[in-house]
Amino acid sequence: TAGITQAPTSQILAAGRSMTLRCTQDMRHNAMYWYRQDLGLGLRLIHYSNTAGTTGKGEVPDGYSVSRANTDDFPLTLASAVPSQTSVYFCASKGQNTEAFFGQGTRLTVV
Amino acid sequence: GENVEQHPSTLSVQEGDSAVIKCTYSDSASNYFPWYKQELGKRPQLIIDIRSNVGEKKDQRIAVTLNKTAKHFSLHITETQPEDSAVYFCAAVREGNNRLAFGKGNQVVVIP
């Protein structure tokens, strides 16, 4: 069982370039989330989606966009990366009355 | 969204002692309260959760207590072991809303 997977595992990206972080789950969970994790700041919610076709902004949405064309996929796009977006990114999914499951994380370095 | 605060930010305990972490939340409609554990370099994983219709839940050395009136819930770890060293995150969720926002986390260090 795959659960929830993210790609890539790590990436070095030049400032100003765009990039899409991929997230796929096979648990048919309605809700999906993107977080960034920085030392001392915990898990900060970037964007979320309650169901396919809908998205919402979290605490730190600026500089990021998401889409939810289907239940399984929830990609996160950085249109023009900046060094402050260097972070570890976690995707998660949650079903109704279930726990949230996290992907393995993507370590992104913007130089 | 739900505002969740965790205290203390860092907690050091001697092996075998108990550790208690407290979370406060602001949304009185929150009805689901999970605790996640994140070991260094790994993804967060659920260790215990509680729903608003109960006041306490226990699973071996881990327990969670909920005080809805005061809007806080706590994680209790008894007989701590070195493998309990990790960052612990709490969240307060209104089921159906599904906006899952976490506190800043508590670093627990168990000293052998």
Image: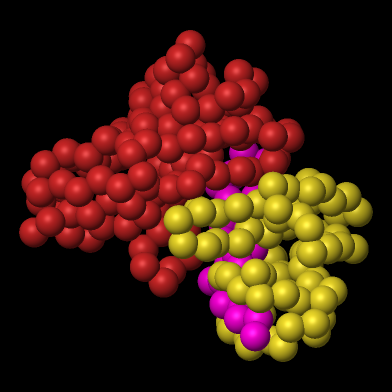
Chain colours: A yellow, B red
- The residue lying toward the viewer, choosing from B31 and A77, is A77
Q: Where is residue A102 drawn, in percent x and y? A: 56, 61
Quarter of the image with the N terminus of chain A is bottom right
Q: Where is residue A8 drawn, in percent x and y? A: 65, 83
- The residue lying toward the viewer, choosing from B86 and A15, is A15
**Residue B33 visible in the current orientation:** yes
The span picked out in magenta is A89-111
Residue B2's place in the image compared with A5, above or below, is: above
The extreme top residue here reads B69
**For this view, does A83 lie left or right of residue B105?**
right
Q: Where is residue B105 drawn, in percent x and y? A: 43, 48
Is residue A99 shown in magenta?
yes
Residue A28's place in the image compared with A18, above or below, is: above
At horizontal 16% and vertical 47% (from top left) the residue drawn is B13
**For this view, does B17 lie left or right of residue B22?**
left
**Residue A31 visible in the current orientation:** no
At horizontal 36% and vertical 44% (from top left) the residue drawn is B9
Q: Where is residue B71 drawn, in percent x and y? A: 49, 20
**Number of numbered discs on residues:** 0
Quarter of the image with the C terminus of chain A is bottom right
At horizontal 48% and vertical 11% (from top left) the residue drawn is B69
